[in-house]
Image (cartoon, grey):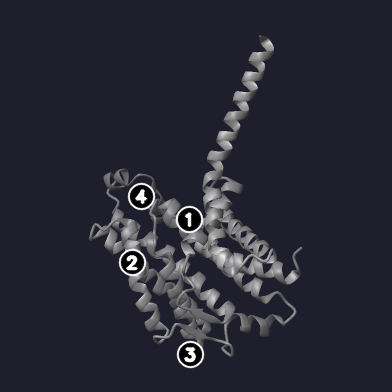
């Protein structure tokens, strides 16, 4: 059903988009904040990375993209913590403003072509050879390093404070921990990972477009929830691996849809359906189990009668 190229492409894109899933894991699951900055931060990472690569600095484009994403997260956190703007509205406001910022970064052009531009992937190709799966190696390596660093960070004192802030902010304040600081750090790191995902994708496909980040929240949530539904909610390592696995599975679902000749215009609808089904899966399973138990009890009652 799948060719080798299709499988490699799904794995590569799954690893790249897994960074968004891990970012939403940090903001949505750990901090318990619905951060809507994701779409704009992803495009910002694409724009910064592409601009840096065109200027001859593809490797520098990755940390610069992360810094720009962290700056976007800081703005969202500032609106939320200092100006008392609700978290969803704070993300929407930042996301709206980022549209103009992203255009400015790309020289007020809607796209940046990189057909003859040196990227981290072309550098890996020259190092490993054309026959090696160099794109998968680069994408997987970046994702694994970020995943390991995120887990290690969440195990530190500051990371534990961030986790506690998401669980019970009132208790954290009573413990003399500055929740403004923990929320700000958490959102900065989350959006830095989102921007890194966009930065890698731009160099992967050798182009950056102003609309690349549209629907990224849905894609990230789909990946995150698919992973949680299939692998459960264990420890931090389990949750991080689940986010990565969910992203890869999501890309395979999209690949199946494309192989079935589903129009590309319908992919966003498919993503929304996947998210809805993944979220509803635990409730549907519980309802099915309840009906099974009730039917079994009724059957036993009838047999006794």
Q: Residue visible at 66% across and 9% down? A: 305
**Depicted 272 relative to depicted 279: above or below:** below
- Horizontal relation, residue 242 to residue 166: left or right: right
Gap in Å between the C-alphas at discs 4 and 1?
Answer: 14 Å
Mark toward the viewer: 4 or 3: 3
Q: Quadrant of residue 12?
A: bottom right
Q: Secondary structure at mark 3?
A: loop
Q: Of 291 and 196, which appears nearest the observer?
A: 291
The residue indicated by pointer 3 is 55
Decide which of tag 3 and tag 1 comes sooner along the chain.
1
Decide which of tag 4 and tag 3 comes sooner along the chain.
3
Asked if the residue under mark 2 is in contact with the one under mark 4, i.e. CB atoms within 8 Å, the reply is: no
Q: Secondary structure at mark 4?
A: helix
Decide which of tag 2 and tag 3 comes sooner along the chain.
3
Q: Residue visible at 40% across and 87% down? A: 107
**Depicted 194 relative to depicted 105: above or below:** above
Q: Secondary structure at mark 2?
A: helix
The residue indicated by pointer 4 is 165
> Which mark identifies residue 74?
2
The residue indicated by pointer 1 is 25
Decide which of tag 2 and tag 1 comes sooner along the chain.
1
């Amino acid at each position: 059903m799948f060719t080798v190229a299709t499988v490699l492409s799904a794995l590569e894109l799954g690893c790249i988009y897994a960074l968004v899933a891990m970012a939403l894991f940090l903001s949505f699951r750990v901090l318990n904040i619905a951060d809507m900055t994701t779409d704009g931060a992803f495009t910002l990472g694409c724009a910064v990375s592409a601009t840096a690569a065109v200027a001859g600095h593809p490797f520098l484009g990755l940390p610069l993209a992360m810094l720009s994403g962290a700056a976007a997260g800081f703005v969202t956190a500032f609106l939320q913590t200092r100006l008392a703007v609700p978290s969803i509205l704070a993300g929407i406001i930042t996301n709206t403003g980022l549209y103009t910022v992203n255009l400015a970064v790309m020289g007020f052009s809607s796209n940046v072509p990189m057909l003859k531009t040196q990227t981290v992937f072309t550098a890996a190709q020259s190092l490993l050879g054309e026959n090696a799966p160099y794109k998968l190696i680069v994408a997987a390596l970046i994702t694994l390093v970020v995943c390991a660093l995120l887990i290690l960070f969440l195990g530190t004192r500051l990371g534990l404070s961030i986790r506690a802030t998401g669980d019970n902010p009132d208790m954290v304040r009573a413990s003399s921990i500055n929740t403004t600081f923990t929320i700000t750090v958490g959102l900065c790191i989350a959006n830095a990972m989102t921007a890194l995902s966009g930065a890698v994708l731009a160099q992967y496909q050798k182009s950056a477009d102003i609309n690349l980040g549209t629907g990224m929240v849905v894609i990230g949530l789909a990946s995150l929830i698919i992973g949680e539904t299939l692998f459960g909610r264990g420890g931090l390592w389990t949750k991080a691996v689940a986010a990565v696995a969910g992203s890869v599975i999501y890309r395979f679902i999209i690949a199946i849809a494309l192989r079935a000749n589903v129009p590309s215009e319908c992919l966003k609808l498919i993503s929304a359906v996947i998210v809805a089904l993944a979220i509803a899966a635990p409730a549907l399973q519980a309802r099915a189990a309840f009906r099974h138990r009730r039917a079994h009890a009724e059957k036993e009652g009838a047999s006794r009668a």
